[in-house]
Image: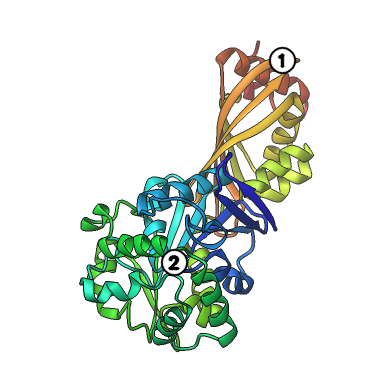
Amino acid sequence: MRTERIGTSDVRFRRQGEGDFAVVFVHGFLDDQYVWDGLIGELTTPGVECVTLDLAGSGDRTQASGPFTYDRFADEVGAVAEALGKPFVIVGQSMGSAVAELVAARHPDRALGLVLVTPIPLAGTRQPDEVMDTFRSLGGDGDAQRAVRTQLSAALAEAELDRLVVSGTRIRPETVREAADCWNNGHPAGERPSRYTGPVLIVRGEDDGFVTAELVAQGVAPRFAAPQTVTVGRAGHWAHLEQPATVAGHLDRFLAGVLPVVRASDWTNAFEEKSANAFSDAFAAGVTLEASILTRPVEGRDQVKNVMAAASTIYDSLVFTQQTVNGERSYLEWHATAFGGTQIDGVTILTKDADGQIVRAAIHHRPLGAVHRFSAELGRRLAGVLDAEYFHQG
């Protein structure tokens, strides 16, 4: 586990695990990033990195100044998502679910999925003042916070309850008041269908007296095109803490459905090794390679791996600069040098089958002069392996 910071700000985030994809977790009202530790420990999905952070005013950021608004929270969480430099699924609980939706909507190119745990509607709960005064006055009042958490949970362990109360009472009263008004008043984007159109999972606790089945059915689910909705038994508003294994199971199944089978590391690692065997491991038997450096496609694992292994040795340097995922395809932007300093840029499109093997690779190089020179050199290195008609001459 490691902790990183966004620039010179007080926004710090923890990174656990390694992978081509990230799962970003956003905590709720009066909570902190550590509420996700138990659930993260139950996850079994391989190849993902789990990321947590404290929202402004909470956890290790209680001294942060306002405003404590959805836009401010979404800006900071979005900055973390951008810093990761990889596709992500974002998970939010209660107030954090609204933040998660805003982040997903602002980063549609990288947000592979959205998970809302006991979600407060983005449009707000619109509770009257006599109800909200109870929540606004929770700042610094440990007994009142304990009572509210006990009332809205069904199976919260005593030790976890104690920790939450300690963490919650550290939050300044003025921060609590502003945060409560934030989730009660909502965000203007909640008044219309969600701008996030990707996969959505909604998780609610069966015994949650605050985020009820009716609230989800009327104020949350209708804003999404085709959300999955699951209910966790013996759980209230903190379902992720009350039944972490169950919620983790739902998240694992959701991840299995939304994480693309394209694992770009298979491809990038093969370039690092520069060997035919490394590329062979990534390819399906009937793989097809199309490239601007070739005059026609190359087909079959044996031929394609030979071409790619030879091509990888021509580069003096190769850096993958950006990755975007869309279903079964990954789009990799890259920058390379060859021939002692010639600059080459390109885009690679990888398509994989259900078993995770590459069935098609399309590689686009530029500029044209570099394309022709690279092709001629590749043909020279593959003389006797591949017919000269596959390559541009000169």
- The answer to whether 134 is drawn above or below residue 258 in the figure is below
Q: Quadrant of residue 141?
A: bottom left
Mark 2 packing: few (<14 Cα in 10 Å), some, or many (20+)? many
Query: For this rendering, which residue is in front, 222 or 150?
Result: 150
Q: Please state the horizontal and vertical placement of residue 241, each as a whole percent of the image.
A: 52, 78
Q: Quadrant of residue 92?
A: bottom left
The local secondary structure at tag 1 comes to: loop
Residue occupying the point 36% across, 73% down: 229
Q: Please state the horizontal and vertical placement of residue 197, each as a whole percent of the image.
A: 33, 54
Query: For this rendering, which residue is in front, 327 or 92?
Result: 92
Residue 158 is tagged as: none
- The answer to whether 283 is drawn above or below residue 255 in the figure is above
Q: Quadrant of residue 231?
A: bottom left
> In the rendered image, which residue does mark 1 sit on?
341
> In the rendered image, which residue does mark 2 sit on?
28
Going by the numbered disc 2, the residue's amino acid type is Gly
Going by the numbered disc 1, the residue's amino acid type is Gly
Residue 39 falls left or right of residue 278: left
Residue 264 falls left or right of residue 176: right
